[in-house]
Image: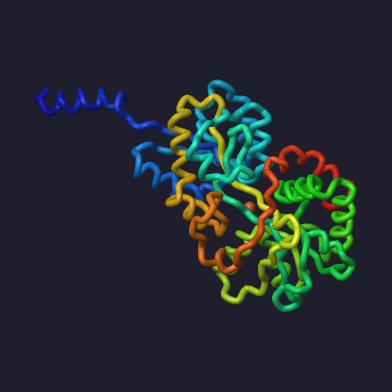
Amino acid sequence: MTRTALFLLLAALAAPAVQAAELVVYTERKEPLVKPIFDRYTQETGNTVRLLSDGAPVLIERLAAEGANTRADIFMAVDAGNLWQAAERGLLAPTKSPALEAAIPANLRDPQGRWFALSQRARTIVYSTDRVKPAELSTYEALADAKWKGRLCLRSSKKVYNQSLVATMIERLGAERTEAIVRGWVANLATAPFADDTLLANAIAAGQCDVGVINTYYLGRLQHDTAGYPVQVFWADQQGAGAHVNVSGAGIVAASRHKEEARKFLEWLASDAVQADFAGVNFEYPAKPDVKLDPVVAAWGRFKADRVNVSVAGHRQAEAVRLMDRAGWR
Ligand code: FE
């Protein structure tokens, strides 16, 4: 063996000691949205990020089954209700981070620090620019008025986004009033609830209905791809509590063996430079205030968001599901 070969062999044997950390992220947020950002983290820090994608309920069961043996360091989900569930199950570690607390507003993170929002997703009213004037619109509640009979489209009540919306309505208005509103919505439906928000927006564009409630990023994609797309955003409840916002976010897995690295990774995701891209790639709103918006998103104008802590979506999820079922929202 030459001296050079011996040196290379020794260097290779020594490598694990100086190897950068690898973080494993269990993510409900879709791979094409997060992979480029995770790769950027690797370029900047040398730490690799591996991801495993699935629906939050599947990932939560997997984390619970793996227990102390899990390789996961971070759990990432696209709804506060799902983040709350993971925390409730004891799967997330409380994290103390002045950087995260400074970056993420208090209503967009778990009061115990078990999860933090990384983007905000507004769920508001959208309307046909051909058949509806914005002056006709006001609140979510007003969509139950008889004037919208046969003109309203909704997504399925099975989607957690709608469960979270109804949960926050119960928190603010009480169960009785919320149920009356939901019954009014169901009575106004133009057609059976849709499987996703894109189908709903396209139904408005096609004239099947005139108004609906969706997460604005779905409309962002459609407006970005089709000039003059005939559906527009209306900010609901601006004289009242404000438009409903939900979050995508993440927490550190309770059984993670790389908690400090995981915390640094979350702090990096919450930094100005990353926040704009994390939200912008999907036409969402950054969780951190005053971060630059994508032009498609900025065009919808500033709005007042409901300030209720998004963990309400978890606390009242079961109650919301039962209410929607009673009211006949399929
Ligand atoms: Fe979505």
Residue 304 lies in what quarter of the image? bottom right
Left or right of 14? Residue 38 is: right
The image's colouring method is rainbow
User: From what the image shows, is residue 317 above or below residue 239?
Assistant: above
User: What residue is drawn where x is 53% and y is 22%?
Assistant: 69
Image x and y of residue 247, in percent: 62, 48
Q: Residue furthest left?
A: 2
- Above or below, 151 against 22 in this view is below
Q: Residue 171 in the image: state x and y as whole percent.
A: 79, 45
Q: Is residue 327 above or below residue 230?
A: above
Q: Position of residue 309 (x, y in %)?
A: 68, 43
The image quadrant where one finds the N terminus is: top left
Residue shown at the point (65%, 45%) measured from the top left: 79
Residue 29 placement, left or right of 8? right
In the rendered structure, the answer to whether residue 35 lies left or right of residue 299 reads left
Farthest residue to the top: give it: 68
Of 307 and 114, nearer the camera is: 307
In the rendered picture of this protein, how many numbered marks are placed on residues? 0
- The quarter holding residue 144 reads bottom right
Q: Is residue 244 left or right of 146 when viewed as pictured?
A: left
Q: Nearer the viewer, residue 311 or 325?
A: 311
Q: Residue at x 51, y 47 (%)?
A: 31
Nearest the viewer among 92 and 154 is: 92
> Residue at 50% across / 51% down in the picture?
278
